[in-house]
Image (cartoon, coloured by chain):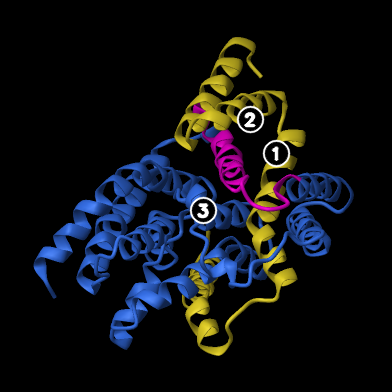
Amino acid sequence: MTKNDFWLGVRGGFPVMVSASPFGALFGALAVDNGFSVFDAVFMSATVYAGASQMVGIELFGNKVQPWLIVLSIFAVNFRHILYSASITRHIGHFSAVQKIFTFFLLVDPQYAETEKRSERGEPVTFSWYLGFAMIIYIPWQVMTFLGAVFGQMIGDPRAIGLDVLLPIYFMALVLGFRQRDNWLPVVATSSLASIAAMHFVGSPWHVSIGAVAGILLAACLPLPAQPEEPAALEKPLTSEMEA
Amino acid sequence: MDQSEHLHLIAIILAAALATFLTRIGGYVMIMQMKRIPPRMEAALNAVPAAVLSTLVAPAFVYGGWDVAAAMLVAFFVGLRLSSLWMLLAGWLVVMAIRHFTGV
């Protein structure tokens, strides 16, 4: 452990912590609103540690969606991490096996982006730096979840203070964050229309899986963009998605 | 929530944590096995987040009531220029104003 690197990481992660904190509190409040206890909310933040998918999880849980579909949806929302872990493999070959397990557990979007940037600048990616960067995000994430959940418990009707409108807007923000991707508009349009129709004809929670499958199938069938020789997916930093 | 329902929720959270960890270590495992993802599979994987998330947005807009729809519309235009915190703030202000003045 080099102490210097650790604090360098803490300093680097600080702005990320500041911008993620409101979302941690929001998650806590909405989790309680969807039937979680304060403990459940913090437990989820501590073990899953992936903001967007946690929001998806509580929304589906609150809607009494089947458990397998909740887990699958969380898996799907977090699927992008596969690209991250493939990509940072090149930079962490010198970590021990235990260090690698921590590294992957803590691999959230900004953590990935900063690791890539650091290695691109030719600076060493040490475990101390990585851990410092991670801890200044991970620990406050739990604290903010706790505060949000306690606050959420004190509020009787979430609709009275407009909390109910925040989740769909939050998800819309995430959708907009992906708008640089190939086929974004046709995928969003297809999944939106399919989910609206499925909500009407089949009902909740099936509108989620039916709508999602429609958009994903469309993307698999659309003409492919010109492919470079390199495995491009493993190289592309997804900078537009670096939130929460 | 009674005790068994609560244990049920804990089990869901643990499964979700495991699923998330698998995505975070999956690329490492995969890159040790093979060098590239088939292009159509990559295109499908790329579409997963936008496709799943759209299904949580569009029905809320259509079936959530006109106050929610108005708030989402305003937030959408804000989101074209500003970050998601501003979208949340704008949408929240709109929905609170509508509920205050019209009593929806």
**Image depth: mark 3 or mark 1 in front:** 3
Q: Quadrant of the N terminus of chain A?
A: bottom left
Position above or below: A92 against A59: below
Q: Which residue is mark 1?
A: B60
Provide the letter of the chain coloured blue.
Answer: A
Q: Per the image, is A171 magenta? A: yes
Mark earlier in primary sequence (1, 2): 1
Front residue (pair A34, A58) = A58
Residue in the image at 33% along x and 75% along y = A102
| Mark 3 and mark 1 on one chain | no
Find numbered disc 2 in the image and state the secondary structure of the residue it sits on. Answer: helix
Specify whether residue B4 is in view.
no
**In this picture, which residue range is highlighted in magenta?**
A160-185
Residue in the image at 33% along x and 51% along y = A146
Query: Can you tell which mark lies on residue A155?
Result: none
Find numbered disc 3 in the image and state the secondary structure of the residue it sits on. Answer: helix
Binning the other alpha carbons within 10 Å of mark 1 as few (below 14), some (14 to 19) or many (20 upward) gives some
Q: Per the image, is A165 magenta? A: yes
The residue under label 3 is which amino acid type?
Ala
In the image, is A201 to the left or to the right of A47?
A: right
Query: Can you tell which mark lies on residue A52?
Result: 3
Residue occupying the far front of the picture: A229
Chain letter for the residue marked with disc 3 in the picture = A
